[in-house]
Image (cartoon, rainbow, N blue to C red):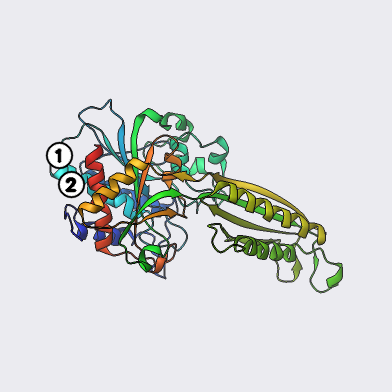
Amino acid sequence: MQSLAYVDANRIYSRIMELGEIGRTKQSGVQRLALSKEDKEAQILVTKWMEEAGLTVSHDHFGNLIGRKEGEKPHLPIVMIGSHIDSVRNGGKFDGIIGVLGGIEIAQFIYSNNISHAHTLEVIAFCEEEGSQFNDGLFGSRGMVGKATEEDFQKKNDQQVTRFDALKNFGSEIDPARYKESVRKEEEIKIYLEMHIEQGPYLDVNSHPVGIVNGIAGLSWYTIMIEGTPGHAGTVPMNLRNDPMIGAAKVIQEINEICSSQPDQQTVGTVGIIQAFPGGSNIIPNAVQFSLDLRDINLTRKNRIFAEIEERLQAICQENGLSYTIKTNIELDPVACSEEIIDVFTSIGKKLDMDIPIMVSGAGHDAMLMSEITDIGMIFVRCKKGISHQPEESATKEDIAMGTEIMLQAVLQYI
C-alpha cells in the first residue's frame, strides 16, 4: 500500500480531538445536538478552520454551514463535499466529523498549493443529520433538495422549542422564513462526495482501512402508540387488564423475530425509545409509545417486513383489548451511488496498490438526499470493532488520512 501523503494526517486528527472537547460527556463521549450552544461553539471553531483553508463561510436558511471556494468558471456546477458535526446523545468523536474536517483538509491542499480549478468547491456541515434534537434527522440535506416542509419547522424539542425558533435564534444570517431561497437545483451541483466512518465491523474484521459505498439502505422512522385502560397497580386483577405495556412488549419481540427470520436478508429493525404514560411505577399505563427504525437496501423487502410488523401489531392489540396508531417521521428509499464515481475511487485505489472493497451502507447519510439532485459518492473509513454512536467510537489517524487522500484525488479529477 502506498500513500500519496498530500494531506496532513496530524492536522486532521488533532482537529477531530479538539472538536471532540466541545460537548464532551462524563463518559468521554460527545453530546452536541443540532442548534444547541455546543453546536454553536463547534460551528465557530469549524468556521475558523474553513477560513484558514481559503473558504468563504456562510449559513443557508436551513442552518447548513457552507465553506465555498469560487472556481474560475462560476457558471459551472459545484463540486460539493459534506457531512455533519452534530452528534447523537453521548455519541462519539468521529461520526460525520471526519467527512467535514476531511473536506476542509482537501480545500486546504487546493488553497495552499494555489491549484486552479474551473468548478466552485463547497464544503458543507449539514444541520441535524442525526435527528437527536427534533427526532427526524437529515434535516439540512432534506431542506437543500427541497423536501423540508412547514411541519418540519414547527417540530419541537424536549424543551418545547420549535425548530423554526431554534434556527431563528442560532444567529448568523439564518432566517427560516426564507428557507425556500436555500433550495438547490439539480443543475447547480456536479457531484456530492461524503466520507464517513463505516459504523459497522466489516472493514475492521477484514482488515481494510477504507471501503467504497455502492448503495445506501432505505430507512423509515416510525412512532408507534399503543393505548389501553389505565388503572391502579394493586387493585386491577391481571386477567382484567388491558395493559398497553404488555402489548408493546409483545410487538417489540415480534419486530425482532420478523427482522431476524431470514439470517441472509439485510433487514434491520430497532426500537430505541420507549415511554409509558403517565409513567408511574404503581400505575397501569394508559398508553405506551415507542420508536421503530427499519432499514433495508431492498425497498420491496422493507415494505413487506413493515406490513408483517403492522399485521402482528394489529393482531396483538385485538387480542389484548388495545388500540394503536403509527406515525411516520421520515421515510427514505434506498439509493445507489454513481457508478462513475465508484470507478474513479477504484482507480485511485489501484494507484495506491489497494484493493478497496465495494460495500453497502446500512446507515443513513446526507448523501441519500443529495442523490435526488446530483450524483453521489461515498468513502467509508474503518472504525474499531464497528462501534459507533458510542463514546468508544474510534478510527485511526492513518485510516482517516487514507480516506481523505482518496477523496482529494477524486475532487481533483472533477474540479
Instruction: Name which residue type carries label 1.
Output: Ile
Q: On the picture, is 318 further left or further right than 197?
A: right
Residue 28 position in % (x across, y down): 38, 69
Q: Residue furthest left?
A: 113
Q: Secondary structure at mark 2?
A: helix
Q: Is residue 225 left or right of residue 341?
A: right
Disc 1 or 2, which lies upstream in sequence? 2
Q: Secondary structure at mark 1?
A: loop
Residue 45 seen from this side: no
Where is 31 relative to 300, above or below? below
Quadrant where the image shows the C terminus: top left
Residue 157, label in figure: none
Q: Position of residue 298 (x, y in %)?
A: 54, 49
Nearer to us in this view, 61 or 386: 386
- Residue 381 vs residue 219: left or right? left
Write down the quadrant of residue 55 in the picture. top left
At x 23%, y 47%, the residue is 408
Q: Which residue is mark 2?
A: 109
Q: Quarter of the image containing the N terminus?
A: bottom left
- Residue 10, x across and y down, in percent: 20, 60
Amino acid of disc 2:
Phe
- Mark 1, Cα crowd under 10 Å, few <14 / some 14-19 / many 20+, is few
Residue at the spot 66% in from the left edge and 63% down from the top edge? 252
Residue marked by disc 1: 115
Frontmost residue, 279 versus 17: 17
Q: Picture coordinates of residue 112 (x, y %)?
A: 14, 45
Q: Could you tell me how many numbered marks the image carries?
A: 2
Give the vertical position of 42 relative to 243 (above or below).
Answer: above
**Residue 207 visible in the displayed image:** yes
Whether 78 is drawn above or below 322: the answer is: above
What residue sits 72% from the left and 65% below the top? Answer: 245
Residue count near mark 2 (Cα–Cα under 10 Å), binned few <14, some 14–19, many ≥20 = some
